[in-house]
Image (cartoon, rainbow, N blue to C red):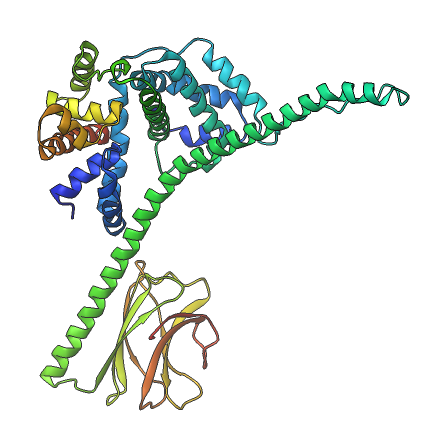
Amino acid sequence: MDVIGDEPQLLARIGNGDEKALGDLYDRYSRLIYSMVLRITHSESEATEIVQDVFLTVWRSATSFDAERAKISTWLTTVARNKAIDRHRTLQRRLPEGERTPSLAHSNQGTIEVARLSSMVGELSSNQCHAIQLAFFEGLTHLEMADRSGETPKTVKSHIRLGMEKLRQKAKGGE
Amino acid sequence: MITEELHEQAALYALDALPAEERNEFLREVRKNQKLAILIEELRNASVIIARSAAEVEPPSTLKAHILNLASKEKPSSTPTLPARPSHQSKKTSAAHGLNSLIPWALAAGFAIFAGILWGNNQRYVSAEAKLAAQHEVVTGLFTKIADLENNIEIKDKEIAGVKDLLQQLQKSNRLANVQLATLSSKLDASFFGSVAWDKDSQEGVLQVRRLPEPTAGHDYQLWLIESGRSLPVSAGIFRVNPDGSARVHFTSMQPVTDVTTFAVTLEKSGGESEPKGSIIITTQ
């Protein structure tokens, strides 16, 4: 789904104040960004606000992004994920422990996500999927994951390395 | 080379899951290791696949229009405006009435200034955040560049070591005990490189160059021998380079020289000059 060929031009148009170009970029990536942020924050209003922030950030700083060197999809997901995880952590800290959102890693939704990731990248074990998704969607370090799962930090590290390597090979081979 | 441990740290770093206490040391390693910097970039690109594993949900249908509407109001030149100052309806109004009528305006102006300050702070925060994200990409690029330069230095060090080895071997064999060896480098471009073997007994030598650019039309490279105590360099002739910028040239001095301290290559008019007039391309230090 990456349509990166024309992205340097699209970014240049956005940098020149072309609102239609911003609309085109929104059409291309808003669903991906919104779905990811919603998964992290579990809040439609938070997700909406963050997607708005991300695209306005692009609008304000498109000229500072070097689309020849880096992928816009990577930039957008990185900015959105950082915002979402920061916002989610801040909100969670304000809640009493019993009211905090539980991890979805072992819920039905988590199982579906593992299946989706496995179907996108063959040969990814469920342990690798879980570890990667906990890090990505819940912002956990490998030590926190080990603490929750009862596995050793070394094992968790290994799941992440092997899983990410398969993802890297997949991304290099074209999605 | 990327060890298994570095690979693990790279995967965690790409997911922002590397603990802070390991991060600084890891980044120092990234600065030295170009392959590692590239690996991180690729792992970050790969993380988009994880984002796609989230259940797909359409954003609210009105969001696009709302963002475009906000964007249209946020042209870079736009600045928050304060409400216009109230006009004086009558100069003859009493002082008390005048004071009372000013209170709401003062409150409104105060609120507007406060809102302006908040807006400005928010803009600065958002802009700083965007800058940070863009700078992250730049930093990754710089790591790659640093690693490139370090690789160049490594290659050059190897070349110098090779020349020194050759000198030692020759001196050991005592065949060329009086051969003077030197390396030439450039302040214009770190990749330009040359080495000279000069035999003062026979007044001849060999110059080897690598990665020199093609001379501009109507120009040639010229080698010069500079002696201590002699005011002008002595020409050792002109030479051309291969398409890859390399050349191996056998040369002799145009005048007898005894104590060459410096070798230099300049870019001169086609056919050469009797004394150097062009830019120095490479020279011994």
Across and down, in percent, residue B116 comes to: 60, 28
- Quadrant housing the C terminus of chain B: bottom left
Q: Is residue B201 above or below residue B74?
A: below
Residue B149 as seen in the image, left or right of residue A108 = right
Quarter residue B166 falls in: bottom left
Is residue A123 visible in the rendered structure shown here? no
Across and down, in percent, residue B19 comes to: 23, 37
In this rendering, the count of numbered labels is 0
Quarter residue B281 falls in: bottom left
State the residue in front, A41 or B255. A41
In percent of the image, x 16 and y 22: which residue is there?
Answer: A130
Across and down, in percent, residue B99 comes to: 79, 22
Residue B33 as seen in the image, left or right of residue A24 = left
Is residue A40 visible in the rendered structure shown here? yes
State the residue in front, A66 or A93. A93
Q: Is residue A145 above or below residue B128?
A: above
Across and down, in percent, residue B234 comes to: 39, 84
Residue A19 as seen in the image, left or right of residue A70 = right
In percent of the image, x 16 and y 84: which residue is there?
Answer: B176
State the residue in front, A135 or B191. A135
In percent of the image, x 43 and y 33: which residue is there?
Answer: B129
Q: Which residue reaches farthest front?
A: B96
Q: Is residue B169 above or below residue B51?
A: below
Quarter residue B182 falls in: bottom left
